[in-house]
Amino acid sequence: MTSGNEMKKKSNERKRVEAVYWAGVLIWAGLVFGVEKLGYLPQMGRADAWTWIFLGAGLYSLVGAVYRYSSEDFTNPPTFDYIWGGILLIIGLNGLTPIKIAWPLVLIFVGTVLLIGTLKKQK
């Protein structure tokens, strides 16, 4: 069983992780909109500023979840973090590639995360 202090520590850690995530997403969105206004936003497929924002937010979420999972300093992220990152990544990839290719890429990433997690737990 977990004690009250341990639960409070996990709750505080979760709040800090969420605050850092949303701050990073807002900074990324500001950078993307700024680059778009300057006319330097890469034009690939049907990509617009929102495509790049969703792509960046999804990658940031998934990389952050993998980092927290592999670090001994953090508790393991909930499954929802991977789902959230995957959804954002799919939305972002949809503007760059046809959705037919986006889903397999996300499935490969999630499968790799699960495989690494399983192998890590066996040690």
Image: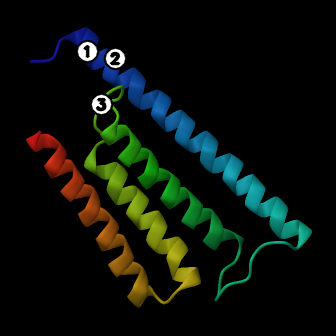
Give the numbered dot on residue 106: none
Up the image or down, 34 lies above or below 3; here it is below
Q: Position of residue 78 (x, y in %)?
A: 28, 43
Tags 3 and 2 touching, CB below 8 Å: no
Nearer-the-camera pick, 117 or 102: 117
Up the image or down, 121 lies above or below 104; here it is above
Quarter of the image with the C terminus in it: top left
Tags 2 and 1 touching, CB below 8 Å: yes
- Relative horizontal placement of residue 102, taking residue 33 as reference (left or right): left
Q: Quadrant of residue 85?
A: bottom left
Q: Write the residue at 41% across / 21% down.
A: 12
Give the numbered dot on residue 75: 3
Name the element at disc 3: loop
Residue lying farthest front? 123
Q: Crowdedness of circle 1 by 10 Å Cα count: few (<14), some, many (20+)?
A: few
Nearer the observer: mark 3 or 1; the answer is: 3
Residue hosting label 2:
9
Q: Write the residue at 23% across / 53% down.
A: 116
